[in-house]
Image: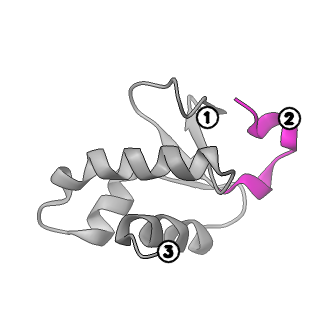
Amino acid sequence: MSDPVETAILDLLAKVPAGKSISPEDVARAIDPESWRRTLGHVRAVARGLARQGKLVILRHNKPADPDDFKGVYRLRSPDTTSPEENAP
């Protein structure tokens, strides 16, 4: 795990209470507080990869979203907070 974005995502998820989520903005600001907007695209790409591996859940409207087919505003949550059926896209 050498990617700073992946490290930041997993570290932030470990710090929030079970069932809570983080925003991509939280991750980008943790990596680069001044130029965080430039990092958002990379955060999305890494989050998609982690969701495919089952390491996190991408949420849209507080419901699990397909990592290969989601658009717009999203949040990230640890997968161990819900039943396996809810984590499936």
Q: Amino acid at mark 1?
A: Asn
Q: Amino acid at mark 3?
A: Met
Q: Is residue 68 above or below residue 23?
A: above
- The answer to whether 32 appears left or right of 10 in the picture is left
Q: Is residue 54 above or below residue 62?
A: below
- Residue 82 on the magenta span: yes
- Secondary structure beneath dot 3 equals loop
Position of residue 27 measured from the top left corner of the image (x, y, whole percent): 37, 61
Q: CA distance from mark 2 to mark 3?
A: 27 Å
Q: CA distance from mark 2 to mark 1?
A: 15 Å
Between 4 and 27, the one lying in front of the other is 4
Position of residue 5 measured from the top left corner of the image (x, y, whole percent): 38, 65
- Residue 1 on the magenta span: no
Region in magenta: 78-89
Res 1 label:
3
Q: Is residue 86 above or below residue 15?
A: above
Residue at (72, 62) in percent of width and height: 18
The residue pinned by badge 2 equals 85
- Secondary structure beneath dot 1 equals loop
Res 62 label:
1
- The answer to whether 41 appears left or right of 85 in the picture is left
| Residue 34 seen in the figure | yes
Q: CA distance from mark 1 to mark 3?
A: 27 Å
Residue at (18, 51) in percent of width and height: 37
Q: Amino acid at mark 2?
A: Glu
> Counting other residues with Cα less than 10 Å from the Cα at mark 3, is it few (<14), some (14-19), or many (20 or more)?
few
Q: Earlier in the sequence, mark 1 or mark 3?
A: 3
Q: What colouring style does the render use?
A: one colour
- Secondary structure beneath dot 2 equals helix
Residue at (65, 51) in percent of width and height: 53
